[in-house]
Amino acid sequence: MKARQKRLAFVALAVVGVSAAAGLALSALNSNISYFFSPSQVLAKEAPADHVFRLGGLVTEGSLKRDGDGLTVLFDVTDNAETVRVSYTGILPDLFGEGQGVVTKGRLGTDGVFYAEEVLAKHDEEYMPPEVASTLQTAHAEGVAESAAGVSN
Amino acid sequence: MTLNWFKFASPASFYPLAGRLIPLFWSLTVALVLVGLYWGFFQTTDHLGGSNPQKEYYRIIFVHVPAAWMSMWLYLVMVVWAAIGLVFNTRLSFMMAKAIAPTGAIFTFLALWTGAFWGRPSWGTYWDWDPRLTSELVLFFLYIGYMALHAAIDDIRRADRAAALLALVGLVMVPVIYWSINCPDPNQCAALHQRSNLTRIDGNILFSMLTMTLGLWMYSFATSLTRLRGLILERESEAQWVRELIEHGEKQR
């Protein structure tokens, strides 16, 4: 083998090795090193009991309530299979709303309520003017329900 | 006219060619960025509807997404030149790789920075350790690492090869960034960052985004070639043609 062919083989080997590493990293992402836990996972006690973790899902329609102090909010997070009640004191992000995706970080209390220190809103990849979006709304609602049900699997 | 491409593998003949191309790429950059930004700021809707009710600030997308695309694309191009340099030991390929790195790093930074300003109003945080954000940050460190490693080794040939190897190993991040959002099964990748799907974007928004991407691409050509000309002069400073160039000026060549 000439020196140039050796170097070519070396580079090819490196690319193969790097692709294998990328594949492993992706499969790790796929097996879900858990950026967040779904309500079903929390109720199945898969989430750490006395650690901070993230809980993700959809805010149940009509579940948002404000406490007497005007700062604490209570809402339900659901994956359309199970539901966990969340309590949060602070300012909610702009895109937070009922029926929208949300990722909260905090601890699970002994009373079964998730006490969040941080609430983040998720939004989707659709970039449409309001009039176009409203016609797509029904289709979207079905899609969200499907994907939320999928998270619990 | 038969064009001999290998002729331009020599720094001496690529130097004037790059000099002629740079003004062309700059004018394309200015034209495309102006059209892209004008259309994006004035010809698109003020509010988004549906499940993504962002207000005016969604317009950060016209800088954020093109910059993020270019950060990944330039890394791929850089690795290709580095690999060609490693295999064929060609001087110009190593210089190409080195000339691309700073532009790639700038776009990675721009993507992270604009993303932070976007994340604050829409998600409620500047930064979160979500798979997409984290892997893009690692890409930024790879660009910085490539430049730092190259600068840390005095011997240029050794520096070229060491930095090229680092770039090659760092290639692992590009598919990770891409699939951290767009993995085959959406339910498996739980992330804060939204997925990307060009078919679900309004035509006007998409037009500005793609025009800006082309504009930033042309900008990458212009700046990389300018940097490349500097590198050629620096590394070939002992060569006869560079001396003649300095004595007689560029016009006579």
Image (tube, coloured by chain):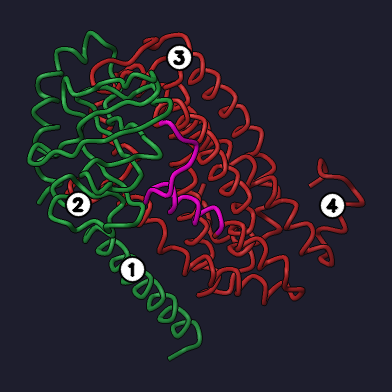
Chain colours: A green, B red
Mark pair 4, 1: CA separation: 45 Å
- Residue at 24% in and 57% down: A32
**Kind of residue at badge 2:** Gln
Bin the neighbour count of mark 3 within 10 Å (Cα to Cα): few under 14, some 14-19, many 20 and up: some
B53 or B15: nearer the viewer:
B53
**Kind of residue at badge 4:** Leu
Q: Mark 3 points at which residue?
A: B39
Q: Do the residues labelled 1 and 2 touch (CB within 8 Å)?
A: no
Image quarter of residue A104: top left
In the image, residue A124 lies at what x, y percent?
A: 27, 31
Question: From the viewer's perspective, is the residue at label 4 or at label 1 nearer?
Answer: 1
Residue A19 is labelled as 1
A36 or B212: nearer the viewer:
A36
Q: Tell me, yes or no, whether dots 2 and 3 are on the same chain.
A: yes
Residues drawn in magenta:
B124-141
Q: Name the residue under label 4.
A: B245
Farthest residue, direction right = B247
B124 or B221: nearer the viewer:
B124
Q: Is residue B227 left or right of residue A86?
A: right
**Kind of residue at badge 1:** Ser
**Kind of residue at badge 3:** Trp
Farthest residue, direction bottom = A1
